[in-house]
Image (tube, rainbow, N blue to C red):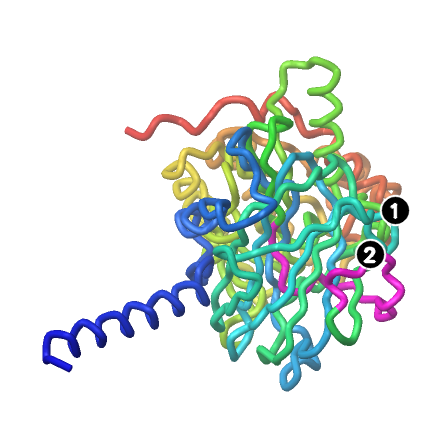
Amino acid sequence: MTRRQGCALLSAITALIVGLSAALYIGVSAGDGSAGARDTFAGGRGSHNSAAPASTGVWVGTWATSPSGAEPGTERTGMAGRSVRNVVHTSVGGTSARITLSNLYGTQPLVVTHATVAVAAGHGTAAADPGTLRRITFGGSTRVVIPAGRQAVSDAVRIPVPADGDVLVTTYSPTSSGPVTFHKFARQTSYAAPGDHAADTDGTAYTEHTSYWRYLTALDVLGNQADGTVVVLGDSLTDGMTSTPGTNRRWTDVLADRLRGAADAGRDVPRYGVVNAGISGNRVLVDGLGRPPENISGLRRFSRDALGHANVKVVVIDLGVNDIMRPDVAPTPGAVLDGLRTLVRQAHARGAKVVGATLMPFGGHRGYTPARDAVRQQVNAVIRAGGVFDAVVDFDAALRDPYDPRRLLPRYDCGDHLHPSDAGYRKMAEVFDLDDLKGSAPAQL
């Protein structure tokens, strides 16, 4: 073999290795979940997928959740050798779908060798409609490796996704990634099974019930039912922590129903998917504990959890109560307002309009003090005066007791004097002016 032939052979081997590595890791995006990363890997490789969609319609978010931490008890084995079947509820429908998987809190690569998506056979079941089950690929491969701290967006798959329906997203991992990235307060029953049952439609293997969402952080749809996405960034009040499980009574669910119903009735309202980026206990300014920190602050997660979704047109922000209520010494109103204004500037830079919420009362809760309530009232006064957001929804005025404005009205109170009841969540959605979702961000000067 001549020296030239040897060099050519070495170059060919190197190219093969690089190609295999690219195929293995394709679809993996940076841990911040930036919109650029999502767009790069989210649907441009449909030619490798036998179920690839026609390139028509608009990609929007129909469901999402924010990773809130590492699931306790999974540090050593993760979900190795088990199938995870997440149940999620859609806001809008489409003709194709793609998913995002997160290994944000893993300590080792998350290896997924089998993933499927299907429409649920009914409410409250692990069974799939057999005619809808589809295999999911990543860069044309049925296997994806997601490094610790990263996320991956799948190829598009053709599937008729209904609006206001349940969808099953199932993943199988043969090895442990360490701690499982999860969302703690799903208020929705999902499932797990030993072995690879990702392709099962009858659901009988899924004997483990869980109140968590694992790995899955977004479901996008392609179609003509919606023109964009509304992302709601919040804490437990948006997470719906005290809503009735399995009934989709978070205020964001009701908002999605209102928006869809108004559009179907011919009203002049935007046709948007609604996704929930609430994390219970979340604050604007301060992270939770751990490395990486659990319950990342609104400031640090905004790019990923709000702006990182598909075709975001509007961000709704309902944050600040935990900043005021949780620390021994509440921050100044100016500190909270500066944090909120920072989020607004980031959204405007990306062309998204921002609707902000006033902070609801918590009189009677163990975290209440007159000094903390005074901070809340000062923050609300600035918000109402138009000094922060493009539009305002006044949750405080809608849910407070008119005879004692420091407290929630009893029928809107779940009983802990902080979180709403189902009726309270419905009221939050009902006072939201759908016309506030019209328009775009102010022009940047």
Element on which disc 1 rests: loop
Where is residue 25? Give x, y as percent: 44, 65
Q: Please determine whether, in this image, residue 77 is positioned above or below residue 370.
A: below
- The residue identified by callout 2 is 201
Q: Decide which of 60, 405 is in the foreground and name it.
A: 60
In the picture, which quadrant includes the C terminus? top left
- The residue identified by callout 1 is 122
Residue range in magenta is 197-218
Amino acid tagged 2: Thr
Q: Decide which of 18, 353 is in the foreground and name it.
A: 18
In the picture, which quadrant includes the N terminus? bottom left
Q: Please determine whether, in this image, residue 195 is positioned above or below residue 241.
A: below
Amino acid tagged 1: Gly
Q: Residues within 10 Å of mark 2 (few under 14, many from 20)?
A: some
Where is residue 17? Give x, y as percent: 34, 72
Left or right of 244? Residue 273 is left
Residue 271 found in image quarter = top right
Residue 212 counted in the magenta span: yes
Tell me the chief SS of the magenta region: loop
Left or right of 307? Residue 16 is left
Residue located 88% across and 41% down the image = 411
Q: Decide which of 237, 117 is in the foreground and name it.
A: 117
Residue 358 appears anywhere in the view:
no
Where is residue 265? Give x, y as percent: 75, 15
Element on which disc 2 rests: loop
